[in-house]
Amino acid sequence: MKLATLKDGTRDGRLAIVSRDLIRYTDASFLAPTLQAALDDWQRIAPHLAALAESLEHGAVPSSRFHEHDAHSPLPRAYQWADGSAYVNHVELVRKSRGAEMPADFLTNPLMYQGGSDSFLGPRDPIVMADEAWGIDFEGEVAVITGDVPMGTSADEARGLIRLVMLANDVSLRALAPGEIAKGFGFFQAKPSSAFSPVAVTPDELADAWDGGKVSLPLSVDLNGKPFGRANAGVDMTFDFPRLIAHAAKTRPLGAGTIIGSGTVSNKLEGGPGRPVAEGGSGYSCIVEMRTVETLLNGGPKTPFLRYGDTVRIEMKDRAGHSVFGAIEQTVERG
Amino acid sequence: MKLATLKDGTRDGRLAIVSRDLIRYTDASFLAPTLQAALDDWQRIAPHLAALAESLEHGAVPSSRFHEHDAHSPLPRAYQWADGSAYVNHVELVRKSRGAEMPADFLTNPLMYQGGSDSFLGPRDPIVMADEAWGIDFEGEVAVITGDVPMGTSADEARGLIRLVMLANDVSLRALAPGEIAKGFGFFQAKPSSAFSPVAVTPDELADAWDGGKVSLPLSVDLNGKPFGRANAGVDMTFDFPRLIAHAAKTRPLGAGTIIGSGTVSNKLEGGPGRPVAEGGSGYSCIVEMRTVETLLNGGPKTPFLRYGDTVRIEMKDRAGHSVFGAIEQTVERG
């Protein structure tokens, strides 16, 4: 099934079921007022949501036209947002851009940072920033929402605790990151509010594009209407979601509704750093990777970070060309 | 007024008002079912809570005996937990213990890390850890809960957005921290679930011990029944809470119910690293500081990190000797 949270003026919005083709929705708030409420009591509520989703597909319940811009992020605020860096190519390129070394254990121990989860943006909300000089960047990612994960859960056990899958734009401020990283306490100001796709889906909606741990479909990232990235989220994902969840749960339990991000989706090419879409490659899911490759090839970056008025669109289509999660589409505004 | 969240088998517990002397409580869930619900609509609900608190003081409403062990952390789960390092003495001692340098701007730019907020421990819950070798430590802190803080809020504006004050035990795994810090993404596994005091209080309850930005009272930290720390939270706090809040809100808004921690309370002595309680000093609010001082004085640490069965108690008494927030008291257990 596909779930959305409709903006209704409240902090947590209203739960809705969306049709597989994203064209219609039906209110689900009589089953659970919010997505968090559904996740808190998933075993009991999910079967009812699934039955309602089937009724919606068959036209057996009242429904209305679904507009993606009416949706908030599936969880407008969450109790946890932990973002991994599962695509090691991304880590290599970003570290090169900073002249930093790779961690010694980068192939065996996932990088993960604790993100702010109290104030997410909606998928069509503007990215309001006070200063362009902060180096505003997007990061196209896949994310999952978990149920309750006990402390010490293994990757194998974690597989069955993935409730929903969605997309993320992990907005990043590149000019603020190096100072925060140098201090060792991780990102804070460098990671403003993230946004998530209009719809979160149960893994079964992904059919054979889901192997229990990752999504094998290309992530479409467009900048100002032009293709910027088409990296396949099923390729070069060194740590799949069950591995990331097990990492997060090593020393504490994870509460239901925890969001785990994949990190920026990034594909190598013949062992190298990939190639821009315009040159026949699968491109990049954030600007800083593009800039690093430009620097490697031409001695300096060419693509600027986001400026006021720039728009990024992040979407994933299935093999038949249909949008799975709806699109994140955000414009940068001065504020 | 003093607020508590009583354990009732639900994820978020039940809101109660506690008497100033912490002896009796009255149910407040008819005004707001949970503390988060009260914070979400504070302007409307706080006056009703305050009136109920006055009625409780006057014996004008039904009440029951308040047992601190029946309380969960005031927010059993929160949308944000951001912990500063406002006491620079702590930062200096911990960095010395790792042989790491101080950040160049440590006197002008607060250190702050994003903590996990989805699964706090109750104030009397055990600290369950799978491995003593992780270097289990406590950190005694003061913390505030904010209302909605717009992006770009100044320290002056932040002052009026502090809703509640409480104590924290920011449990830390010292053996896991250096590896995570070296990778630059901040703490994750090194910071398991934190716990907070049984009661959170409005700043007016602190009377003249609250200057709008910090609490000028000693923090009592006992290890296995013996005094370990008596550092004054009003002394050597380089960044007060309004400064910490403004830092957190630089590039994003903070949602109502955001918890901001002070970092480990730590006092210098004549410009030095303080002195243990047993030697007439104000001691330390975490073990790693004690170990660093032992190393400085004697060439090696003597006090071990927490072992299974060890108990830490964190409490703050007003000038008349009455507990303000109730006590955090936690025993380490194998799990």
Image (spheres, coloured by chain):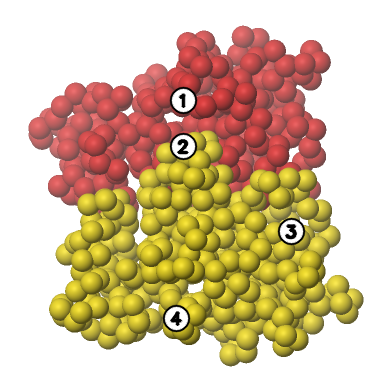
Chain colours: A yellow, B red
Whether labels 3 and 2 belong to a single chain: the reply is: yes
Instruction: Give the chain of mark 4.
Output: A
Residue A323 badge: 4
Image position of B157 with respect to A327: above or below: above
Task: Give neighbour class at mark 2: few <14, some 14-19, many 20+ (Cα, 10 Å).
Answer: some
Q: Residue furthest bottom?
A: A225
User: What amino acid does circle 2 point to?
Assistant: Met
Task: Give neighbour class at mark 3: few <14, some 14-19, many 20+ (Cα, 10 Å).
Answer: some
Instruction: Give the chain of mark 2.
Output: A
Whether labels 2 and 1 belong to a single chain: the reply is: no
Residue at the image point whose x is 64% and y is 16% from the top: B304
Q: Percent x, y for residue B107?
A: 71, 45
User: What amino acid does circle 1 point to?
Assistant: Gly
Q: Which residue is mark 1?
A: B335
Residue A178 badge: 3
B185, B221: nearer the viewer: B185
Q: On the rendered structure, is A132 left or right of A12? A: right
Q: On the rendered structure, is A98 left or right of B145? A: right
Whether labels 3 and 1 belong to a single chain: the reply is: no
Mark earlier in primary sequence (3, 2): 2
Q: Residue furthest front?
A: A208
Q: Which residue is mark 2?
A: A151
User: What amino acid does circle 3 point to?
Assistant: Pro
Q: On the rendered structure, is A96 left or right of B79? A: right
- CB under 8 Å between callouts 2 and 1? yes
Marks 1 and 4 sit apart, C-alpha to C-alpha, by 44 Å
Instruction: Give the chain of mark 3.
Output: A
Q: Quadrant of the N terminus of chain A?
A: bottom left
Indicate the secondary structure of the residue bearing disc 3. helix
Q: Nearer the viewer, mark 1 or mark 4?
A: 4
Q: Percent x, y for residue B249?
A: 53, 59
Image position of A260 with respect to A139: above or below: above
